[in-house]
Image (cartoon, helix red, strand yellow):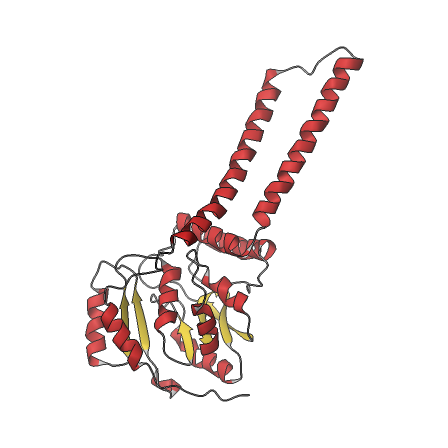
């Protein structure tokens, strides 16, 4: 970090880790005033951890990066250069993803492209949460307190000037991903429902389409009965139609349930997170970091 040549702080968020992570970081903080820790009382989730970091970050430029360092910190000086040029958001774009399975790459590509189709927010393709945001972007983000958060979507939603830095994401050198398929699906659902009502519209259109198909089927059946004195034979076809309709109804109810559940979460008005070391974190925030006025391009 000394390469940057400006005052800085390293703010770690411990999201309910059960190993010695918090203890080690607290030891570093005692010997280095630049190191600070936010220690969650339990696991609140990746997106909430990013939110807490933004809440307590004190600088004029804030870089969000995962602690596994699969995203290279070496890009930070380049990101700061872009910020110095006047960009308020500098996001990193993965030109290549090494060490990931074909399934992971395919689902990631599908996720970003589905978001582009279903949401009304322009989220750049192949980007993650590794990015630099200006203080005013951070302040705008801090004013948004929704519970089911999709940070990279919120960053795009608040606007401001943005630029990309392309890089090759190297293979993970240690540990395993904390995003299994179940979490990925949950994350995708949060991204879509946070920024789009299109699933509800699609459910409505599907209902109209099935109603139209049912009406046409009814007309054909009545026509056969009235003009040919015969009926459409077969219980199997009837049961298949009923199963199809019931399946569609359950899907629509599931979509409605996702939106209603999010409304319920908002009405409970619970805090986004709880810190185990609240007093220390507050004292560290008061100390802050020396502010730096950005040179304008």
Rendered location of residue 179, percent (x, y): 38, 54
Q: Foreground residue, 126 or 60?
A: 60
In the rendered image, which quarter is residue 6 located in?
bottom left
Please count the marks in the image. 0
Q: Is residue 152 visible?
A: yes
Q: Dividing the image into 4 quarters, which one contains the N terminus?
A: bottom left
Between 200 and 131, the one nearer to me in the picture:
200
- Please name whichever residue, 151 or 268, is drawn nearer the observer in this view of the structure: 268
Give the residue at x 61% y 20%: 238
Does residue 106 show up? no
The residue positioned 51% from the left and 35% from the top of the image is: 250
Is residue 164 positioned above or below 122 on the image? below
Q: Is residue 3 left or right of residue 255?
A: left
In the image: residue 33, left or right of residue 6: left
Left/right placement of residue 164 relative to residue 209 reads: left
Residue lying at the far top in this picture: please name it: 229
111 lies above or below 220: below
x, y percentage for residue 41? 25, 59
Residue 30, position as x, y percentages in the image: 19, 78
Name the outermost residue toward the right: 227
Residue positioned 58% across, 53% down in the render:
118
The image position of residue 27, as x and y in percent, is 19, 74
Quadrant of the rendered image containing residue 243: top right
Name the quadrant containing residue 244.
top right
Residue 39 located left or right of residue 117? left
């Amino acid at each position: 970090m000394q390469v940057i040549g400006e005052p800085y702080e390293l703010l770690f968020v411990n999201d309910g880790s059960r190993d010695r992570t918090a203890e080690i970081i607290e030891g570093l903080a005692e010997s280095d005033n630049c190191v600070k820790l936010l220690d969650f009382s339990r696991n609140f989730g990746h997106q909430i951890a990013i939110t807490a970091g933004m809440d307590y970050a004190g600088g004029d430029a804030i870089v969000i990066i995962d602690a596994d360092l699969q995203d290279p910190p070496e890009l930070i000086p380049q990101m700061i250069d872009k910020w110095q040029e006047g960009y308020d958001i500098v996001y990193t774009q993965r030109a290549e993803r090494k060490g990931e399975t074909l399934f992971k790459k395919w689902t990631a590509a599908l996720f970003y492209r589905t978001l582009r189709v279903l949401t009304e927010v322009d989220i750049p393709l192949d980007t993650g949460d590794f990015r630099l945001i200006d203080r005013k972007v951070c302040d705008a983000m801090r004013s948004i307190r929704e519970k089911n958060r999709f940070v990279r979507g919120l960053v795009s939603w608040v606007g401001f000037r943005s630029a990309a830095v392309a890089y090759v994401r190297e293979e993970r050198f240690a540990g395993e991903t904390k995003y299994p398929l179940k979490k990925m699906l949950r994350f995708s659902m949060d991204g879509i429902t946070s920024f789009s009502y299109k699933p509800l519209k699609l459910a409505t259109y599907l209902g109209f389409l099935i109603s139209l198909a049912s009406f046409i089927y009814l007309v054909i059946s009545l026509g056969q009965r009235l003009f040919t004195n015969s009926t459409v034979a077969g219980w199997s076809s009837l049961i298949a139609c009923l199963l199809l309709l019931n399946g569609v109804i359950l899907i629509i109810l599931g979509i409605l349930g996702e939106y209603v559940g999010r409304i319920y979460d908002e009405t409970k008005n619970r805090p986004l997170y709880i810190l185990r070391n609240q007093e220390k974190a507050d004292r560290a925030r008061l100390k802050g970091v020396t502010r730096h006025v950005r040179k304008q391009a």
